[in-house]
Structures are given as C-alpha cells and as structure tokens.
Image (cartoon, coloured by chain):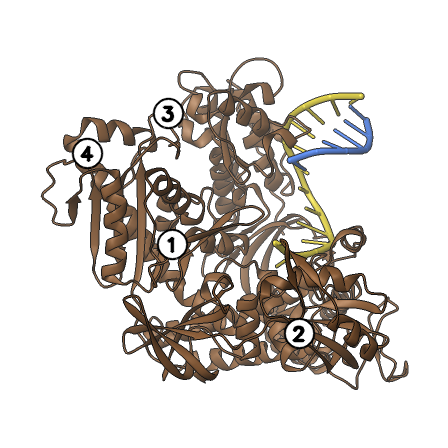
Chain colours: A brown, B blue, C yellow
Amino acid sequence: MQGLLLDSDYLKRRDPPAMRLFVKKDGEVISVLDPNFRHYFYVTSEDPERLAEAIGNVEADRRGEKVTPESVEIVEKKLLQEPEETVKVIVGNPRDVTPLRKEVRDLPMVIEIYEHDIPPSRRYLIDHELTPMEGVEVEGEFREIGEGKELIVTKPPEPVGEVEEELKIMSFDIEAYNPGGDPRAEKDPIVMLSVADNKGFKKVLTWRDFESTDEYVEVVENERGLIERFVQIVKEEDFDVITGYNTDLFDFPYLEERADELGIELGLGRDGSEITSQRRRFETVTNVPGRPHIDVYALVDFLSRMGAIRLINYTLENVYEHVVGETKPDFEKSEISEAWDSGGVEGRKLLKYSLSDAESSLELAEEFFPLVVELSKIVKQSIFDVSRMTPGQLVEWLLVFEAHRIDELVPARPAGREFKRRQSKSYVGGYVKEPKKGLFENLVVFDFRSLYPTIIVTHNIDPATIDCDCCGSEESVRAPNLEYEFCQNKRGFIPETLRDLIEERADLKRKMKNFEEGSRKYQSLYNSQWALKIIANSFYGMLGYSRARWYSNECAESVTSFGRHYIKKTIEMAEDEGFDVVYGDTDSLLCRLKEQDRGNVDDFLEKVNEDMPGMMELELEGFYKRGVFVSKKRYAMVSEEGKMEVKGLEFVRRDWAALAKKTQEGVLKAVLRGGSPEKAAEIVQEVTKDVKQGRVDLEDLIIHTRLKKPIEEYESEGPHVLAARRLKLHGEELEPGMTIAYIVEKGSGSISDRAIPVSRFENRSYDPDYYIDNQILPAVMRVMEVLGYSEDELRYEETKQTKLGAFESC
DNA sequence: TTGAAG
DNA sequence: TAATACACTTCAA
C-alpha cells in the first residue's frame, strides 16, 4: 500500500513496543505498526572489541527492573569524516537507553557516547529515510483491534515521493467563565467551544440557550456535555489536522484540566486514545495521536522572530488583520462572564465571537500550513515537531538526517562544563561602516546574495575541514586575519548540505517565473523556496550557537571574517570606480551616484563578480531617490517609486510612543519625498503645540515594552518594570513575553514612578513635558540634527517666532 | 558624570 | 534552545 505519511509516533508502552505511522490512503487513515524496529546508541573506544564485550555484560536498573542490551555490534562509522570503529548498543525498549547509558558511561574504555539523545520516533524516520507529508510504501498484514484495524508491517517502509491526498484541517477555540479577569481552570467552567474546518464544517457548542437562530449553534446540557460532544465531533468528522490559536498554552491545557475535574476522557486521538501533554522547558505541548496538532500562535511567533511579521501585540485579532487584511469581531475579554450571565443580545454576540475565533485561526492555519509542510519535507521530521522548532533546531535535525546518510556520528548537545566553556566564548561579527551623515540624493544599493551561506559553501567551512591534516598551507584557504585554514580536498557535509538547499531554491525560483503570481502552483513553489531560505539562512547562526551539536566558534568566526573581508574589498573597489560610498553594513553597500555614474553600475557589478570566488555574488538591490543618514544602523531612504524604507529609527521601534513615531514619520516624508526640511520643522511645532494644549489621543502616548523575564528577576527598575508591578498589584498575571503598555503621568519623581499601565490610567493626565522632551524631540532631532537644525528651532514656545536655519542642500 | 541594565 | 553590532534611555552610584 502507498499513502501519505501524515503523522508518526513511537509506542514505548506497548508490548512489544512499536513505531506507528498514520498513513492516509484514498481518504482513509490507516495505522501502521512496526514492532521490528530497535532503538540504539553508539559508543567509541580505543579498544572497541573489548568494550563491546564489556557492554554485552552490562546490567542496569530501570525502576527496579533489570535491563540489558538486546545486542551489541561493532560498526564502521565516521567521526569528522575519519573512519571510527564504533560499538553500536541495541536495546529492546527505548526506555532502556537512559539506564544503560549511565552504566556504560562508567566503563573504563569508553571515550564518548553518541546519539543516545535522539528520540525513537525521529530515529525511525531518519533511518528509513521517510519524508513526512510525502508518500510511503508499506507492506504487512491487517489485525483487528477494538473497532478498527492496524497494519503490522512485514518489511521496512520505504519512501515513494509525492502523493496527492486532501487533508481535513480543523481549528477550535474555547471560551471560559472568567469573573475575575483570567479564568481559573480548577473552578471556572468552559462555557463555549467552537469548531471550524476547511471543508465548511462549523459549530458552536454552548450550555446556555441564548435563543440564537444560527444553525451552527448547538445547545448542550452542561460543561460535561460540551466536552463530550466535542470529542464526539472530532471522531465523527475525523479531522486530519487540529489547529487553534495559542492552543498549546491555553485551550488544550484548560480543556485537559476541566476534563480531569469532571472525570471525562479526552479521547481525541485517531485510535480513540487520550491526548498527551508534554512539559518542555518554557511551554507545554499537546499531542493528539494521528491528528497532528499545530498551534498557529507558535508559527506566528516563529515568523515574528524571523522578522517576517512585525506587530506590537500578537493577539489573534492583530495577526488576522495583518495577514488577511480584514478585521474580525473582537470581544472585551473581561466581559465574557457578564455576557454569559446576562444572555440575550450579549450572549448571542459572544457566540458569534467564539465562532469567529475558530474561523479566523483556521484561515491563518491555512495560510501558514503549506510552509510547515515544506519545512517538514526538507527537515524530514513530522509537522507536529517541525511547527514547534526554532531555526537552529530545523538545521540541526536536517543535519542529523544527512549525517546518518554518510555514516557520520552525531555529536551530543553540550551540557555542564562544555556548555559553560562555549558560552564564555565570543567572536567579531559583521563590518559596519560609519555613515556619512546628512541628506543625499541619487543613491544605489548593492548587496551580496545570501552572504554567509555562500561563504560557508564557497570556502568549505565545516568542523571537519578546518585545519585538516591533508592540505599543506599552500592548498588550503585561510580565513582573513585568522589562523584557521579550510581544506580544499574533501568537502564538508555542512557546506554540501547547504549547497543543495541553495541550488534547489535557485531552481524553484526559476520555475516560479513560468507561473502566474497568485496561482496555486506559484504559491506552492513560493512556499518551498521560502522554507529553503529560512533553513539556509540559519546555518551560520547554528555554528555560533553554544547549545548546537555542530557548534564551532572557529567556523562561525571564520564566516564573519570572510564577510568583513569581502564587503571591505567591495567598498574599496566602488571607491576606485569613483563611487562615493555613503554607508555599508555586513553584506551591503550604498553609494551616491553622480549623473555620469549611472551607466557604470552594471560594469562595476561585472568587475566585482569576476573577482568573486565560488557561489558568491554581488547584486544590484535598487536605486533610491534620497536618503537621510543618522548613524550606524539608523537611516531612511525613499525609492524611485516613492516607497520609504526606514532602518533602526524610532519609527520602526515599538518601545516608543506612536506620537513620536508618527511625528518622525511626517518629518522623514517631508524631508525625503518633498525634500523640504522647512515643512518638517512646521510639523514638529504643530505637534508639540498639540501636546502642550492637551489635544492628543491617549492611544498615541502608549509606550510598549515586552517583558523579557519574570518580573522578580529585574534588577533595575525601569518604567516598564514598575508599570508591570502595578499591574500585578491589581491581580494581573505577568509572564515573560507579555507586552506592557504604559503612559507617563504628570507629576514629580522618576519616570518609572510615573509609568502607569494603560488599563489603570483612567482619569489621570499625561506629562506633556515628558512626551515633548523625551519622546518627540529626541526622535525628530535624530533626523533634523544631521540636516543642521537645532532643538531650539523646533520647540514650540508660547509666542516666540521661530527662525528656520539655512537648509544645507547636498 | 558614568556604568550597568534594559 | 540560531549569530553579532549598534544606538539609545533610564536608573542609580
């Protein structure tokens, strides 16, 4: 049988333990079991023969039960590409790995233990080279169990490439009774639960009748009825994928605790089994066997960390509006219990809101699901796992897969002393040229296409190729101004893996040109190339990350050193060409062109690229009409099409009041589009006047700062810390990652003393002087100062007639 | 005024 | 649980 590999897990509690694959074939999902797979780990030694014998005799204790290795073999593996006779310890049950490893660790002949930290479900996919969300071929015999059946494999499953199978994607959302603001799972019941899927199914369950005429509303008897009906719906509709917004942190844990309280089994699994929640360091994740659970919030969080989405608050409402471009109904959270109690119109409004949550998170899930599928196909781990991975983990699991293919041993993640040692190390990053400050016209921007990835590939940067024994110093290539040299004989597996990704992406981008933008095929190619880009761009960061398996400070340091070398060299060449280089940062340079230079741009690119080795390539990013340069990392430009691009300035930062940002934006537009600093000066005076006279919207005075750690851990009492403490005093829960919104109140004392959370600001009045002196003027002066204006010329003083300084044109 | 924390 | 560079505000010694 061939079908789509939808989900997979390892059943360690079964007897015998078995790997399970959920395979979708012609609309039906079949549970495929492989009890023949054996988990294992590797041990290296000076004397593998003797060690193998010793390990064969090891006995360990697993909770009072005696465990021994099932078998021990000597296998040929590689360590940094060098052959290594290695002892493979095969276990009967994956749960034996930890106790056995502890015993083995203490044997005298052991050098190092490898791959004990790879979970069996991931191990299985890697060893069989299966690709989740693609096809798999299985062969075996069916066995009846309970109401269903299982296929017991008689030979190992094999990958078979793409297969077509439609998926039923469902999204759900719960509303809980919350008289005190936040619902308390131990006593506050779930009052509503909404479900929507991509085939048009929708349902709102409620246990109070608000006499709604909407056909999707179903009134059940009580909370118990609601949860039981939900389980029944999931079974009847047989969804393939379960999603929701913040379901890992809120909906599932809450549902679990309520079900526990009422003694209900949450048998949402495809085999009727209960959901399992797994506590990780910072969060809890919920697994629904056979129905991959994807939390849309985790995806949004991932994209926001990468800078693909940039918002002040990542609420469902905000994200939906940003992504879909429409507003969804919102409901004041604190009024949920009131609406529930009072019923009528308010109750019906709550029903609509509840459904809209499920429907809009479904829309977001459909938007991001293709990306997750592509990431999953590249990394070759399940969509459940991949949707929760950081960029570094994506690279790492792809490398674990590639390492297995070439028999390379996978290094363990560091712990203890090794981790501390790595953490204490640092290295120099990208080169940033001090900008020429001021307003410039007629600009051109060049940048290196994927600078760090192409450096890694071109110079073969890899822990196995650094300072090799095979090349003399004449053959190998030295990192600029460093002692490290890179082998030119053998290729590293990291640069080789990366090269494949980059070439595959280039290929997809070529194919995209044959399809219309927005067409299905185009979108699918777009998502594939996007996934490849995300992973390719994370290789460098992974090399410098102290918790990474393939961490190499030397490699990371070499990458940035090559980067500095190439950008500096290119800046020099641009200057030799007669270009006036205004600014440069890491992989880009920005030049002011004289009229006659325009025709030389292509010649310059050609000249630079002739010199560039391997995959490296300088590209033309674009032409800009004007730009104002303030300092390193802070500037704004306007393209020839009139599009404004702002970097580093207050305008793009969330920890500044909107008022300061809007004023700065106005100033930048006046200067860049109109070329008129005089107009800019007028804007500033206008706004400061409004602030003094109290004619501003409170919304525009809010400053947002995100809590980075638990409130108790803050040593210094900054404004957002004190504002957060005030929230806590009034019973609000504080968590790292939360955004604190505050306004500075009029009065005396430090700014922190006067930082009032927005929710408690009520009838207070804001401090006009703070907003003028600490928000508007600094933001605006940043720009105006380089144009030759002084603060006095911009400040609105009651009657003083302002004189405008001479505008120094460039 | 300056350094640390953010 | 991907990297460094950089500018800047606020507090507190």
Is label 1 or label 2 in front?
1
The residue beneath circle 1 is A274
Name which residue type carries label 4: Gly
Mark seen at residue A180: 3
Question: Between disc 1 and disc 4, whose residue precedes?
Answer: 1
Q: What is the three-letter code of the residue carrying label 2?
A: Thr
**Nearest the camera: A632 or A450?**
A450
Are discs 2 and 4 located on one and the same chain? Answer: yes
Q: Secondary structure at mark 2?
A: helix
Work out which quarter of the rendered image holds the N terminus of chain A and state it: bottom left
**First reached walking from the N terminus: tag 2 or tag 3:** 3
Which residue is nearer to you in this view: A630 or A633? A633
Q: Residue at x 44, y 32 (%)?
A: A700
Which callout, 2 or 4, points to the residue nearer the camera? Answer: 4
Is residue A456 at all visible to an observer of this figure?
Answer: yes
Which image quarter: residue A295? bottom left
* A574 shown above or below A297: below
Element on which disc 3 rests: loop
Could you tell me residue A282's position as x and y percent?
56, 46
Which residue corresponds to mark 4?
A347
How far, Cα to Cα, is label 1 from label 2?
Answer: 47 Å
Q: Are marks 4 and 3 on the same chain?
A: yes
* Mark 3 surroundings within 10 Å by alpha-carbon count, few (fewer than 14), some (14 through 19), many (20 or more): few
